[in-house]
Image (tube, grey):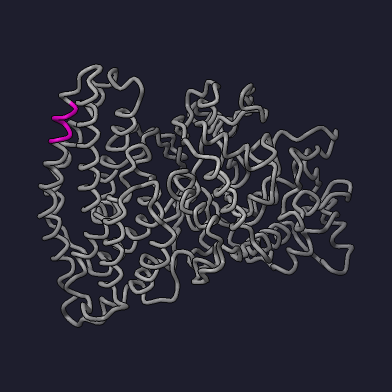
Amino acid sequence: MRWRVAFPGICVLLLIAVILTSQGERHASLSDGVVAYFKRQQPVFAQKTVLLQQCIEQLHAGDSTSLLAARQALRECRISYKSIAFFLEYFFASEAYVFNAPAKYEIEEPYIEYEEPVGLQQIEALLYDPQVWQHRQELAAQAAVLVQTAQDLNALLYQFSATSPRVMESIQQELVRIMTLYITGYDAPLLKSGIAEAAAAMKAIDTILTPYQDLDKKDSIRYYLQAGIRMLTMQPDFDSFDRLSFLVNYALPLQRLLLNSNYDLFSPAALKTDVFPHNGITGDTALGRRLFFEKALSGNATRSCATCHQPGRYFTDGLVRNRSFVDNKELPRHTPGLLYAGYQYSQFWDGRVQSLEEQVKAVMHSPQEMNANDDTVLQRLRNMPAYGSISLLQVQAALAAYLRTLAPFNSPFDHYMAGNKKALTNEQREGGNLFMGKGLCATCHFAPLFNGLIPPLYNRTEFEVLGAPANDDLAHPLQDEDSGRLAFFPIDFYKGAFKTPTVRNAAVTAPYMHNGAFRNMEQVIDFYDKGGGNGIGLSVSNQTLSAVPLQLTANEKKALIAFMEALTDKDR
């Protein structure tokens, strides 16, 4: 379930590549080359949709051969789509949505417009449903839409024009998709065609850029493209593909060359917090840090932000649920951590406010949390020499500014991605590949922040319905009654939906989930391994997490935990 927002996301990664300025007048034809390439690939893709439609029409109840043929046709269709995805996703997003939308309802906020599941991902979900034979009519309808749309794609080129920088931007965004979506199985978690799809996407980039590359230079765009394609082609198995090696050895060097920069996707400066929601007031970071520990902000001057977000506990409290300010009863939700909180388009588990400034104000005014009265708080602060004639807006801005600094990017994983190949153990490397592969963790916790910001633009915050139980006994689960985002946004699809948090520092910030139900990481992984709420026997009609078991082995689970430990920041 995704919440679409209008803020720009990725910054550094949308620079114009040096190759466009180093080839003189030749780069002027880049747009023409893209159009010619698309004209060659469009009929190939259109034919693949026809073959998929024919296989779907030949499905017969109980006939496993026809089902396997349909799945194979879907795989070939998906791979062919990725040959033109960079072009469609950037220049013709509406048509791209028809082909590759998520297999679940999308909600346009704040307009409450519903977008039904459509396209290749929805066909995958239906073809792998245990009741697949009951979906023949819907499958046929989906295939018909694909065929018609694919056949009409050439009409998009009528009077089409694009500058070379925009073409390069489309390629740069596609490379981010390859690194964060394709090789992680985001598009095809059941078909597991992501490695072959990534190869098709890189081949498309290679074809487009070939006239503008130094073919003889080893450390060149051409070299990394060809080497990356070779690895993707020679190791096509989804579960065993070595993603970390692919990223470090090929994809990230390629990205740096395309950007003519020392930055890449995993550089701390790749995403900047100043593009995320704030009220426009520049806050004093040093003042914010002082206020973070200031108990005068609470109603009876006994509680500060640091009371529940303790720096020594990675800005969490270590409790299942903290206590209410008023009656000392348990709060309804687990206290979330604050590290990397600045990299979100919404705050709180239910995303009920957009900015950190709004979050500060909401927490201060909450009777359960700080129970503050503005006039009383300001009078206290103004009586202290350290604060002078401070205003409430200054308090909000300063605290928010401090929170935006809580992004160390100093874990062993970060050091590994920066080039220190000794920073991770073999088990941690295995766990990283599982996280981005068989475990499907990275299909919701997207690199590099490992939260719910969706690549390649990082301009949407994702909410998911996991079906997390109210207790930690997966053999006897209890239904959780927390309505999640539904209480703030009364739409049935949002029942039990919560923001996807970062899993950076997750290894040291137990307990877990919005309700703190799971005491350790082993329980969390078992929950996902079994398929979420529906997988453990609960009835969660709108669950967005796949209920298909991951079938992780005991050693794989250990490796995943080891990787989580590698996401722990050393200095905070």
For this rendering, which residue is in front, 94 or 249? 249
State whether residue 269 appears in this view.
no
Which residue does the image show at 79% across and 45% down from the upper left? 370
Residue 491: give x, y in percent of width and height: 50, 29
State whether residue 95 appears in this view.
yes
When asked about the image quadrant of residue 328, the answer is top right
Q: Is residue 415 above or below residue 329?
A: below
For this rendering, which residue is in front, 81 or 17? 81
When asked about the image quadrant of residue 12, the answer is bottom left
Q: Is residue 480 above or below residue 296?
A: above
Q: Is residue 259 above or below residue 485?
A: below
Chief secondary structure of the magenta portion: helix
In magenta stretch: residue 360? no
Picture quarter with the C terminus: bottom right
Residue 561: give x, y in percent of width and height: 59, 48
Which residue does the image show at 75% across and 38% down from the upper left? 321
Please indicate whether residue 414 sits to the left or right of residue 338 in the image.
left
Which residue does the image show at 26% across and 41% down from the upper left? 99
Q: Which residues are magenta?
A: 51-56
Which residue does the image show at 83% across and 53% down from the upper left? 377
Q: Is residue 224 above or below residue 25?
A: above
Picture quarter with the N terminus: top left
Residue 276: give x, y in percent of width and height: 53, 57
Please indicate whether residue 125 sits to the left or right of residue 440 in the image.
left
For this rendering, which residue is in front, 389 or 478? 478
Please indicate whether residue 313 sits to the left or right of residue 422 in the image.
right
When asked about the image quadrant of residue 293, the answer is bottom right
